[in-house]
Amino acid sequence: MMLPIRLYPEEILRRECRPVTDFDAELRRLAAAMVETMHAAPGVGLAAPQVGRDLRLAVVDVTVGEEEDALLVLVNPELVESSGSEIDVEGCLSIPDLTEKVERPSSIAVQASDLDGNDFEVEAEGLVARAICHEIDHLNGILFVDHLRGLRRDRARRHLRRLERDAVGVTA
Ligand code: NI
């Protein structure tokens, strides 16, 4: 099932999400719907607040459905290690039409649970590490634009103001 993607400046995108405690059929349905929505968008990651759910759940697939093994479903993910740094272009399904270069760790380790509540650890580099960091940020109410400085931040702020105006609509 496709879910509508919440757009900036919706309040839920700024929330610190609640940990998942019920590893039930509803969680599975939500995760499956998030994967479908991410692939259709298309995007390489999606976090629960982006579909209006205040939960620490994110999905990542840098192959956008090309390789089944590439799909990561992360429940209650925590960054446990990070090293190096890399600057690359990022965008967000909740902030249409904006991409900017963002600095992220080049290599990370993350602890998470799967949909059955079993813990696992994943190590990632490059684009996968970037996508996971971006999604964990979402679970803490942080958007990629929050990492920008200088001219990039100014450009992003102008774009965000336009999105705020569009959300309110024109009153005449
Ligand atoms: Ni995003």
Image (tube, grey):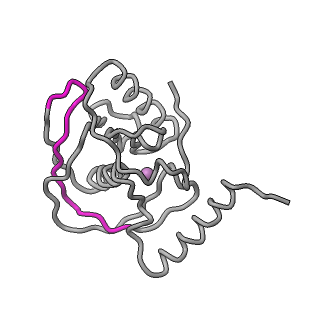
Residue 81 in percent (x, y) is at 13, 57
Please indicate whether residue 58 sits to the left or right of residue 154 in the image: left
**Horizontal and vertical percent for residue 36?**
45, 30
Residue under the image location 31 percent in, 56 percent down: 130
Q: Which residues are magenta?
A: 102-118
Does 160 sit above or below residue 112? below
The structure residue drawn at horizontal position 54% and vertical position 54%, both measured from the top left corner, is: 8
Q: Residue at x 40, y 45 (%)?
A: 44
Work out whether 12 lies above or below 9: above
Observer-nearest of 71 and 21: 21
Q: Is residue 111 magenta?
A: yes
Side of 164 where 77 appears, left or right:
left
Residue lying farthest bottom? 150
Task: Give percent across and percent down for residue 105.
Answer: 24, 63
Rendered image quadrant of residue 17: top left
User: For residue 34, which quarter of the picture?
Assistant: top left
Magenta region includes residue 8 = no
Q: Residue furthest top?
A: 25
In this orientation, which residue lies closer to the viewer: 147 or 108?
A: 147
Which residue occupies the foreground of this view, 19 or 160?
19
